[in-house]
Amino acid sequence: MSKADNSAKATSPSVAIHVDGYEEQDQERLKLLDPNSSTPIVTPSGQIRKVKSFTDTHRIRDVNAASGAASARSLRPYDQVATYNPEGSDSGTNHYAPSVRSLASIGMGCTDGRKMVIRRVPTSPTELFHLVRPPTPPDEDTASQESNCGEEEEDADTVHLKPRRPFWANKIQFVLACVGYSVGLGNVWRFPYLCYKSGGGAFLIPYFIILLICGVPMLFMELAVGQYTAHGPIGALSQICPLFKGAGLASVVISFLMSTYYAVIIAWAIYYFFTSFKSEVPWASCSNRWNTAQCWVPNHNITKPNGSQTPTEQFFERKVLSMSDGIEFPGGMRWELAACLICAWVLVYFALWKSIKSSAKVRYITTTLPFLLIIVFLGRSLTLDGADKGLRFFFKPDWELLKQSRPWVNAASQIFNSIGIAFGSMIMFASYNRFDNNFLHDTLAVSLVNAVTSLIVGIFTFATIGNIAFEQNTSVKVVIADSPGLLFVVYPQAIAKMPASQLWAVLFFFMFLCLGLNSQFAIVEVVVTSIQDGFPDMIRKRLVYHELLVLCVCAVSLVFGLPHIIHSGIYLFQLMDYYAASLSITYLAFFEVVGIAWFYGVDRLSQNIKQMTGQVPSLYFRFCWLIAAPALLLALWVASLVDYTPPSYRQYQYPAWAQVMGWTIASLSLLCIPVYAVVVIVRSPGSSLREKLRNSIRPTSLCDCGVAGCDICCSDSEPPEDKITMN
């Protein structure tokens, strides 16, 4: 026996290998050689099979990048194969020699009896440790530079594209992204608005119940799915359960619709921000040209006259919005708001044009600074006269209201909007995590920060509303109309009475601008990431640059947001918010949790989580995924349909055609799930409906070794001749 043979024998495990369909003499052609050997490993068919990966957009240069289960996600498919000439002639051409040579250092790993997982044979204590405790994949930049082989010609033209999905630079960036999204417009704008609309304290009870049953467990589930699959909502759900890929598509549709009118709120904040630099805030008095005879300055000794409006209400409606009498009277464009809207989208674009590399740095400021200002405004609001009246309304529930479905539906809408559940944002954020990140801590931190911030914002909001009720000598329930502009009426009125009101106004609206941008970053990133994952070839050929994709998304969203800033824009805004973000969200969340917990399976998901974190999720999480959350979501969805009431803006009732338009907007997301489910079933392989259905719920690209995107494991979908089985 030669020295080379002895070396090969020493480094290779003594396991019998059998390749189906070949004679005994052909078996000898499959060799496991020393890592320094230049003889390639080939299958008897003369080909190296095409491997699979979740990140199939671009190519990897060296299989040696795969060191253990975690780093398998960094592999990409080969586009070329190495052919083997059994006769030993020169006619056989090795089209990918460096990668083939690297396969010579691969040994055998685990097997399930019919397939074999091939892994590198450890040759040092360090490699042995990495086999037991796999390292995280290399960074984006190093992954594209650690190649031994020559660059392909087409890659020279696409070096400006991300070579693969990047990672967060550190854990703080990921947590700030999640906290920045949850502590955004959902807390400062939507929470007080829905809480006031739902009766104050009667809103808090369902809010915390839904948070514990649906919010925290579903956030944990979404982070698990995103981190495990390393894909956005569409790609993640299509691999978890192809039948429910429409749920991922629906979340992207909702995110796009929300991005169009969330940017309008940011435009309002920009308008107020620049207006605050005037020598006197313009909403403090009734002496402006837009004020009418109904303008009334609050006075504690005088009850508010019927039909009157405060200066802050008239400034928002008559100056900022210049609102018409209804949605049927569109009027012209508010060019000042149009300029603010363009400014908002410019800020969003330059924060996202480099993906998470740029947005993560921006969030260091936009996430941390608002917390300081929130604490400052909390202290100020508690010292206002009448603050106790507002706090009693906020914390004392009206038990009769809990019998109605509206507080429960609004609470669910707030939980999902604030935390980002079913919108795809958290799945997208987690897809940039490293494989072994412990996201249980992240889940608890984000949920706790979100709940505490909502309470703090609620306290200083209702303390301010109590002060307004005290000055108007009226009750808290009727002090202000429950319109989406509640925030732009309550806070400016309180700020106008503060010393150095201009300074406080600038600080407040800068804080609000930061919070709005945080929410907008996450919403737009969902759309961009989903397009990047869904159409990689088209983007590479047509758009070429990643920055152009972000520019296209921002430009399209800007165009769709322009109808919200015409004179009747506030009515369209209310219509969109009611149908796109409130009515559809429980429906979408129900199918998402059913698709993951019931069809993919709680046990399988728990095993995936154990692979990433080393721990199986608690019984509480599994119970909520399997029973509690789907039951509660279904009940809320049915109740919202039974107690459906058409939307309204104060006393204005929408015409029938506007309600039809609202349901059309809602159907853009509602129909995604059933329509795409039918498409998946029809396209699934199988001769019968039962077989097609079974194939449509089978997870894709999940290897038997249990590692998502393992590029070395064999797959059921591969040809029989490429499978290696054990005797």
Image (cartoon, grey):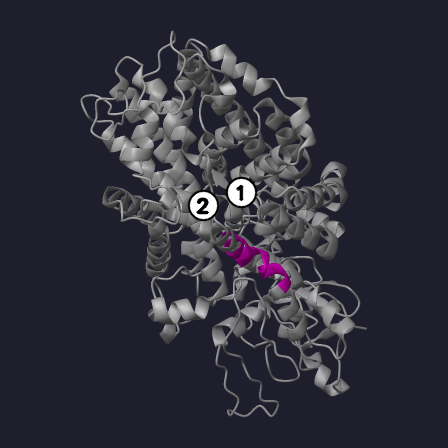
Q: Is mark 2 in CB contact (under 8 Å) with mark 1?
A: yes
Look at the picture and state if 30 lies above or below 630: below
Q: Left or right: 562 with respect to 104? A: left
Report the magenta residues as a range: 662-674
Horizontal and vertical percent for residue 419?
Answer: 54, 38
Badge count: 2
Query: What element does badge 1 sit on?
Result: loop
3D distance between C-alphas at marks 2 and 1 = 9 Å
Q: Viewer-proximal residue, 297 or 147? A: 297
**Disc 2 packing (10 Å; few <14; some 14–19; many ≥20):** many
Residue 355 forms part of the magenta stretch:
no
- Earlier-in-chain disc, 2 versus 1: 1
Residue located 56% across and 60% down the image: 235
Horizontal and vertical percent for residue 260?
Answer: 40, 49
Q: Viewer-proximal residue, 254 or 67? A: 254
Look at the picture and state if 222 lies above or below 196: below
Query: What element does badge 2 sit on?
Result: helix
Residue under numbered circle 2: 522
Three-letter code for the amino acid on which mark 1 is drawn: Gly
| Quarter location, residue 621 | top right
Residue located 53% across and 63% down the image: 75
Q: Quadrant of the C terminus?
A: bottom right
Residue 420 shows which numbered tag? 1
Q: Viewer-proximal residue, 332 or 78? A: 332
| Quarter location, residue 320 | top left
